[in-house]
C-alpha cells in the first residue's frame, strides 16, 4: 500500500554508512525530513541526484531539515560511495529484510528488488507533506523539494 500526502509516515530504523542507527521518528518535533529512495549506489542518475543534494547541502541539512537517502544497497557499499563522493548526509541501508522500508512506502519495484525514485517530505509532526515517485531512469527536481520545505 502506498503512502500518500497527509498520512503518518511509516517509522523505520536503518543503519547509515557509519553503522549508526537512524530512526525517522527521532526527528519528530525538531526537523522536517526529506526521505529520498534511490535504486542503487554507483549508478549515473542516482549519483547525479545525490551529488546535487551534496552540493546544496545547506538546503537539505540544517537546524530545520534532515535528508535521509535510502536504497537496498548494503552498509559497506554506502560507506565506500559516501567516502568517494563526500556525502555527509545519511545513506541508509534497506538491505535486510530486503526493501522492507521501500515496501512500506510503496516504492519497492518487487520484480527487480529495487526502489523507485520516491521522495517523501515528512513534516515535524511526522506527517507526509509531499510525495513524488519517478520511474527508475527519471531524475527528480530538487527545486520542488526546496519549495515544499520553504512552505513548512
Image (cartoon, rainbow, N blue to C red):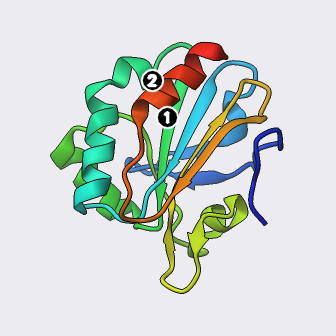
Residue 83 spot, x, y in % from top left: 21, 46
Q: Can I make out residue 71 in this image?
A: yes
The picture quadrant where one finds residue 39 is: bottom left
- Callouts 2 and 1 close, C-beta under 8 Å: yes
Residue 67 is labelled as 1
Q: Secondary structure at mark 2?
A: loop
What residue is drawn where x is 45% and y is 23%? 61
Count neighbours of disc 1 (C-alpha within 10 A) and say few if under 14, some if 14 to 19, many if 20 or more: many
Count neighbours of disc 2 (C-alpha within 10 A) and say few if under 14, some if 14 to 19, many if 20 or more: many
Residue 86 spot, x, y in % from top left: 22, 38
Residue 129 spot, x, y in % from top left: 71, 33
Residue lying farthest to the bottom in this orientation: 111
Quadrant where the N terminus sits is bottom right
Q: Label 2: which residue?
A: 61
In the rendered view, tell whether residue 52 sits above or below residue 107.
Answer: above
Q: Secondary structure at mark 1?
A: strand
What residue is drawn where x is 29% and y is 39%? 87
What residue is drawn where x is 75% and y is 54%? 3
The picture quadrant where one finds residue 65 is: top right
Amino acid at each position: 500500500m502506498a503512502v500518500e500526502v497527509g498520512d503518518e509516515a511509516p517509522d523505520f530504523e536503518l543503519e547509515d554508512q557509519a553503522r549508526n542507527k537512524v530512526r525517522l521518528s527521532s526527528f519528530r518535533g525538531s526537523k522536517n525530513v526529506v526521505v529520498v529512495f534511490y535504486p542503487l549506489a554507483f549508478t549515473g542518475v542516482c549519483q547525479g541526484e545525490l551529488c546535487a543534494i551534496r552540493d546544496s547541502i545547506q538546503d537539505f541539512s540544517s537546524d530545520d531539515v534532515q535528508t535521509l537517502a535510502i536504497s537496498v544497497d548494503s552498509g559497506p557499499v554506502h560507506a565506500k560511495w559516501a567516502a568517494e563522493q563526500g556525502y555527509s548526509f545519511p545513506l541508509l541501508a534497506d538491505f535486510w529484510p530486503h526493501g522492507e522500508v521501500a515496501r512500506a512506502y510503496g516504492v519497492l519495484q518487487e520484480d527487480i528488488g529495487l526502489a523507485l525514485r520516491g521522495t517523501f517530505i515528512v513534516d515535524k509532526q511526522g506527517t507526509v507533506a509531499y510525495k513524488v515517485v519517478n520511474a527508475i531512469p527519471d531524475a527528480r527536481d530538487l527545486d520542488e523539494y526546496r519549495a515544499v520545505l520553504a512552505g513548512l
